[in-house]
Amino acid sequence: MAARDYIRERFFPHIWCQGCGHGIVLNSLLRAIEKLGLSKNEIVMASGIGCSSRISGYVDFHTLHTIHGRALAFATGVKMSRPELNLIVPMGDGDALAIGGNHFIHAARRNIDITAIIMNNRIYGMTGGQFSPLSGFGTIATTAPYTNIDHDFDIVDLSMASGASFVARTTTYHAQQMADIFRQAILHEGFSVVEVMSQCPTYFGRKNKLGGAVDMMEYFRDTTTPIGSKAKKKNPDLIERGIFIQEDRPEYCSEYDQFIERAMKGN
Ligand SMILES: Cc1ncc(C[n+]2csc(CCOP(=O)(O)OP(=O)(O)O)c2C)c(N)n1
Ligand code: SF4
């Protein structure tokens, strides 16, 4: 099947603003799935609420558009009952790490076989540009007109510390790398986190005078570098992108099956 065959055309036109990074994420995701040759019936996408979460409306898989911050809880339920299916959960930084932060930490800790995609545009896009936990100190948002005094944290560090067994970061500038990382994340058996630095030109870009979508993507090009590059040694402020960890560790559903088997035998 070609990438465009996975699209649910009746839901178009999409809601995203011109230049929003979320469409690039959708494109790279469909290219990864095309390469894997998965059928629509093998994929379940669960999402919460947000511009990023709207991706679930545009793909012709089994989809659940659920509650803000709770997509991973729904996905966990689906995966536990049908472990043979591929669960993909697209989230915004607010959905995944503000209201959904606790669900995120515990899904990672369990190492359940779900692919979590975090579209980090450092803002609540859908609700009008409020600051998120990823906005960062000194940025401007509609709810921080005199600059934000909250500090952000590193999604990759949080994911690794919480127990995710596949952790990666990429950007909307690096669409081909993104597709390749998505492919590997879906294949990986365990909790996979892919942070995608994505642009919201409408709120984060405009409020912080970062220019248009192209300027924001060029910023991702210029401020990131492959993991372990020479450039990083020279300039420690560069943000690394690539796959940080990819480890085989006991996966939650298969551990659960073994536990049930032991319980049935009474030992
Ligand atoms: C329980 C609940 N609280 C708040 C909201 C309002 N709300 C909807 S989306 C959203 C944040 C969206 O930001 P993010 O998840 O980062 O995604 P983006 O829109 O930036 O892609 C909020 C606060 C809601 N729908 N439900
Ligand atoms: S408000 Fe921002 S995140 Fe939402 S669609 Fe527009 S550009 Fe994208």
Image (cartoon, rainbow, N blue to C red):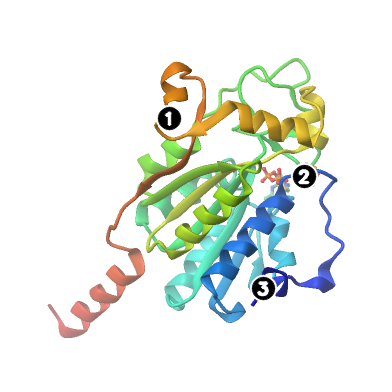
Secondary structure of the residue carrying numbered label 3 = loop
Pointer 1 or 3: first along the chain? 3
User: Is the CB of the residue bearing disc 2 within 8 angstroms of ligand 2?
Assistant: yes
- Looking at the image, the residue that sits furthest to the left is 267
Label 1 beta carbon within 8 A of ligand 1: no
Which quarter shows the N terminus? bottom right
Point out residue 50 in the picture as x, y percentages from the top left corner: 72, 50
Give the total of numbered labels: 3
Ligand 2 quadrant in view: top right
Q: Amino acid at mark 1?
A: Ser
* Precedes in sequence: disc 2 or disc 3: 3
10 Å crowding of disc 1: few (<14), some (14-19), many (20+):
few
Q: Amino acid at mark 2?
A: Cys
The residues bearing labels 1 and 3 have C-alpha atoms spaced at a distance of 35 Å
Residue bearing mark 1: 229
Secondary structure of residue under mark 1: loop
Alpha carbons under labels 2 and 3: distance apart: 24 Å
Q: Which residue is mark 2?
A: 20
Circle 2 — which element? loop
Crowd class of label 3 (few under 14; some 14 to 19; many from 20; radius 10 Å): few
Question: In x, y percent, where is residue 59?
Answer: 70, 68
Q: Is residue 167 left or right of residue 170?
A: left
Q: Amino acid at mark 3?
A: Ala
Q: Position of residue 220 (x, y in %)?
A: 63, 32
Q: Position of residue 261 (x, y in %)?
A: 23, 81
Q: Is mark 1 in CB contact (under 8 Å) with mark 2?
A: no
Residue highlighted by disc 3: 2
Residue 163's place in the image compared with 2, above or below, is: above
Q: Earlier in the sequence, mark 1 or mark 2?
A: 2
